[in-house]
Amino acid sequence: MKNVKYLECINCGAQYKPEKGRYTCDKCGPALGILDVIYDYDYIKSKVSKESFANNKDYSMWRYEPFMAVEENGPKGKLRVGWSPLYKADVLAKEIGLDTLYVKDDGINPTSSLKDRASAIAVAKALEEKAEVICCSSTGNAASSIAGNAASVGIKTVIFVPGRAPQGKVAQLKIFGANVMSVQGSYEETFKLSAEAIDKFGWYNRNAAINPYCVEGKKTVSIETCEQMNWEVPDWIVFSVGDGCTIAGAYKGYLDLYNAGFIDKLPRVAGIQAEGCAPLAHAWAEKRAWKPEEENTIADSIAVGVPRNAVKAIRAVEASNGVWETVTDDEILDAMRFMGKHAGVFGEPAGAAGMAGLRKLVASGVIKKNETVVCAVTGNGLKDVVNAIKAAGEPIKVEPTSEGLEKALTQIGY
């Protein structure tokens, strides 16, 4: 990979070659030794420019291949991931109290979540390494995304999910032919079992907080957003946070553009966690080190009591002079209705958590009316129809008569 200099431990600074099977630092171990991909920005600048992007007809995340740690023109999955819509949500902005708001709807990816970006690069790396099996643990979205992307190239998957994973996501897994292990325990227990299996059988490890390349896939959401905004940088980006990998990637996307000379400033980062499982946000508010928490929230995709990419997530917020915020499950449900009604975007609970947090940050004055904001919707609402109905309510039941119709219409003011 000519665009990659080396992998660097975020804990001790040790450097490694990007070789097969290299995920974490030998000195610090899997828990602390998370690796960063360090790029040769001069090489990247020699390969792409704003003008070359303008002429690029590949409307997928692979238009940003020079910014990713994959073999040049190497093997890829078959699903079209990326280039999701960026909506200038004027009605939503007015309702919230902002002048300018953009909504990045990543729920339209092939398996209906932002996690497809990480899985696409994981599949590319697995193909490079000629892996026969890919394994991961997930609360749902990462699982279904790797199962779908791997199925597109015929790679087998073994997926570990906690027993509380929504049926919609489990159904996706089974449809994609995954071997699904439903662990009757917490996400942390699920993660440990997947790690044990990976070590035993030597499967390709797609666990995003362990595999440094997954962040490189997730960062394309920011590079893409920046290009869609004609290389203008928002004042704020807002993301929901579970294990920390997505927000780390979102910030790194802008950082890479800055280092490559595409932009001249960086956005501030707002990380949103569910109040029932907010180890990073609670630590920030209380000015202490984070500690594990229970997983008590309907937002299953961010219900991670032991975030494996905490250091990168914290770094993204601190380096950008950003903030953390928490939202209750009721606020998440309200945000699902609010965003659907005023923007026509349907997010699952974790996908709408960012919007719930944005509303609080604007109401409290942390984010100002004249500041430009990009809020990411990380997963589609059809992933979790049970909570969608809880948010929106049941339909009006109508008797099949004229009298029944009149009675029903009266209920909605007609």
Image (cartoon, rainbow, N blue to C red):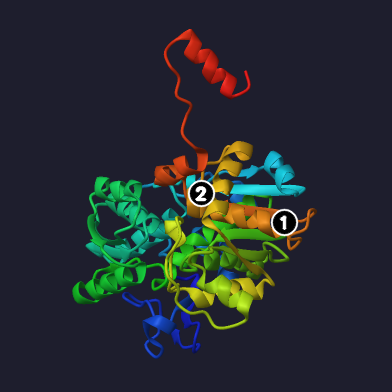
**On the image, numbered disc 1 is attached to which residue?**
362
> At 78% from the left edge and 53% from the top edge, which residue is drawn?
369
The C terminus lies in quadrant: top right
Between residues 7 and 269, which one lies in front from this camera angle? 269
Horizontal side of residue 381 vs 144, given as left or right = right
- The residue closer to the viewer here, 352 or 406, is 406
Q: Which type of secondary structure does the marked residue at label 2 adopt? A: helix
Q: Nearer the viewer, mark 2 or mark 1?
A: 1
- Name the residue that disc number 2 marks: 106
Q: Is residue 190 above or below residue 142?
A: below
Point out the residue furthest to the right here: 370
Report whether residue 110 is seen.
no
Amino acid carrying label 2: it is Asp
Q: How many marks?
A: 2
Kind of residue at badge 1: Val
Q: Earlier in the sequence, mark 2 or mark 1?
A: 2
Residue drawn at (45%, 76%), measured in percent from left and top? 292
Query: Farthest residue in the top direction?
Result: 402
Q: Residue furthest left?
A: 201
Q: Return the x and y of residue 294 as percentages of the image width and height.
A: 42, 70
The image quadrant that residue 43 belongs to is bottom right
Q: How much space separates mark 2 and mark 1, taking CA atoms?
A: 23 Å
* Frontmost residue, 371 versus 44: 371
Q: Position of residue 223 (x, y in %)?
A: 58, 58
Position of 38 relative to 144 (above/below): below
Under tag 1, what secondary structure?
helix
Disc 2 to disc 1: CB gap under 8 Å: no
Q: Residue at x 44, y 79 (%)?
A: 34
